[in-house]
Amino acid sequence: MYPIYQNCPIFKNDKLTLRLTCAEDTEALLNCYSDEIAANKFNTDNCNDTFLYSTVAQMADTVALWQWGYETKQYVRMTIMLNDSGEKIGTIEMFNKGTAMHYGVIGVLRIDIMNPYETKDVLHSIFDLAHTHFYRSFGVEWIFTKLTETAKLRTEVANDLGYVHADNYHLEHYYGRHIARNYINE
């Protein structure tokens, strides 16, 4: 298994910090998960939930589920925090999905952020952290993310960073970026 499941690091760039989501994040994350506009961009594929909540109890149950997912080495859910204010603006999830026909080993990246932070600079910072750390941390060749019609700006940013439509993937609206396109090395 990957070292990220033994001791989850904190990832940071000039704008954002990612760290493992914990119970103390619950109330702050409700701001994201009660945001109906943001929820329209969440990737809920293979989930039995819409991730749209109105109570702290609902959010607490989900945070506990995410902690269980980490402990059982299924996925890593990290809280996204602004460095200048410490505000918790959402979460990011990543997991190794295994080998997908035509692609090799893929990881699936889910990004859930409050609508006011769905901006080019925040999205670039999120993708920057994923590209810098997640290929190696999860042992993947590709990072796939879901980009629907409701996520126009997110799609624009991803395309700028080399994401291409995953034509042969079994789920709709997925775009992928191969490690060879890692812009850090360009």
Image (cartoon, rainbow, N blue to C red):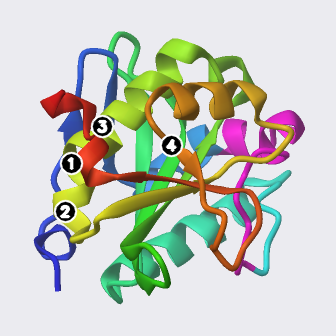
Residue 87 visible? The answer is: no
Q: Check disc 1 and report the residue beneath it.
A: 133
- Contact between labelled residues 1 and 2, with CB atoms less than 8 Å apart: yes
Q: Residue at x 42, y 33 (%)?
A: 126
Q: Check disc 2 and report the residue beneath it.
A: 137
Q: Residue at x 25, y 68 (%)?
A: 138
Nearer the N terminus, badge 4 or badge 2?
Answer: 2
Circle 3 crowding by C-alpha within 10 Å: few under 14, some 14–19, many from 20: some
Give the Cα separation between the discs numbered 2 and 3: 12 Å
Q: Nearer the viewer, mark 3 or mark 4?
A: 4
Nearer the N terminus, badge 2 or badge 3?
Answer: 3
Residue 76 visible? The answer is: yes
- Contact between labelled residues 4 and 1, with CB atoms less than 8 Å apart: no
Give the Cα separation between the discs numbered 3 and 4: 15 Å
Q: Which mark is residue 163?
A: 4
SS of the residue under disc 1 = helix
Above or below for 146 versus 18: below
